[in-house]
Image: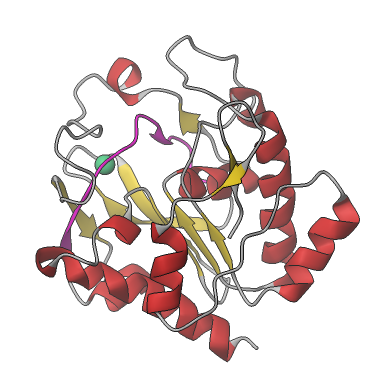
């Protein structure tokens, strides 16, 4: 699991639900401190069985060739650099990747895709992707693409998800296919067409699986961990 910085960048941090979800699925979660040392990044990639890219701040729009709109949220350039390098190295090694929220955006940009910097201003007809209820409750549905890994994992065509994002994928990155869309057409999941397990979602499954109504989301972590074990 890559990690965030706190607001004054003094501490590395990750919300406890991410390691809890990995442990619940049967694997040992390990926090990877952000670094600009490329040798260390290569060693991280060699050491881990799979990479979880968690949620967090917005990516710097220059990473996908855009000037920053004023609606873009807080950015952390050092974290961007670390995660992009780590993600590309893990992709190169063909090890499993699970991206969540910022993680789907990071993966997309790592593969030369682009983002909406702010859905409410750039897609004003989109539904409320910053839901008002607590993040542990689902607020909108997504349709899973037939024949996708996502559809197989969830064993469903439609799934209820939570929604805590003001950005989303615009142009899909190279090699990725869209595997879940919201009713307004916003891209909510992608997977790599030729990679053994490279799956990313715009929602937060780590906050949903503990609740009976949305426990299906544990399956995503179970599938990721299973893939990590079989890739060893
Ligand atoms: Mn959403």
Q: Position of residue 111 (x, y in %)?
A: 62, 48
Would residue 172 be counted in the magenta stretch? yes
Identify which residue is drawn at 62% across, 61% down: 31
Q: Quadrant of ligand 1?
A: top left
Residue extending furthest toward the top:
70
Secondary structure of the magenta portion, mostly? loop
Q: Is residue 130 left or right of residue 175?
A: left
**Magenta span of residues:** 158-173
Q: Depth check: give the residue in front, 91 or 192.
A: 91
Q: Is residue 148 visible?
A: no
Q: Which residue in the rendered view is the most extreme toward the front? A: 10
Rendered position, 172 above or below 114: below
Tell which of 114 and 51 is nearer to you. 51
Residue sitting nearer the eye, 117 or 18: 18
Which residue: 35% across, 29% down? 166
Q: Quadrant of the C terminus?
A: bottom right
Q: Is residue 124 magenta?
A: no
Towards the viewer: 191 or 25: 25
Where does residue 114 sit, x and y in percent of width and height? 53, 34
């Amino acid at each position: 699991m890559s990690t965030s910085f706190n607001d004054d960048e003094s501490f590395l941090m990750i919300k406890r639900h991410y390691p809890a979800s990995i442990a619940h699925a049967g694997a040992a979660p390990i926090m990877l401190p952000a670094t600009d040392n490329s040798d260390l990044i290569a060693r991280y990639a060699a050491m881990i069985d799979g990479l979880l890219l968690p949620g967090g701040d917005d990516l710097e729009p220059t990473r996908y060739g855009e000037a920053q709109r004023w609606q873009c949220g807080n950015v952390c350039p050092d974290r961007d650099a670390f995660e992009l390098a780590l993600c590309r190295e893990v992709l190169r090694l063909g090890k499993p990747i699970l991206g969540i929220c910022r993680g789907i955006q990071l993966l997309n940009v790592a593969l030369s895709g682009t983002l909406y910097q702010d859905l409410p201003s750039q897609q004003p007809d989109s539904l409320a992707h910053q839901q008002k209820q607590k993040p542990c409750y689902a607020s909108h549905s997504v349709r899973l693409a037939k024949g996708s890994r996502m559809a197989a994992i969830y064993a469903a065509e439609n799934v209820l998800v939570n929604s805590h994002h003001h950005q989303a994928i615009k142009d899909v990155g190279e090699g990725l296919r869209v595997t879940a869309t919201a009713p307004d057409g916003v891209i909510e999941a992608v997977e790599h067409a030729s990679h053994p397990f490279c799956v990313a979602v715009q929602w937060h499954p780590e906050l949903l699986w503990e609740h009976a109504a949305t426990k299906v989301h544990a399956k995503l972590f179970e599938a990721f961990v299973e893939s990590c074990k079989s890739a060893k």
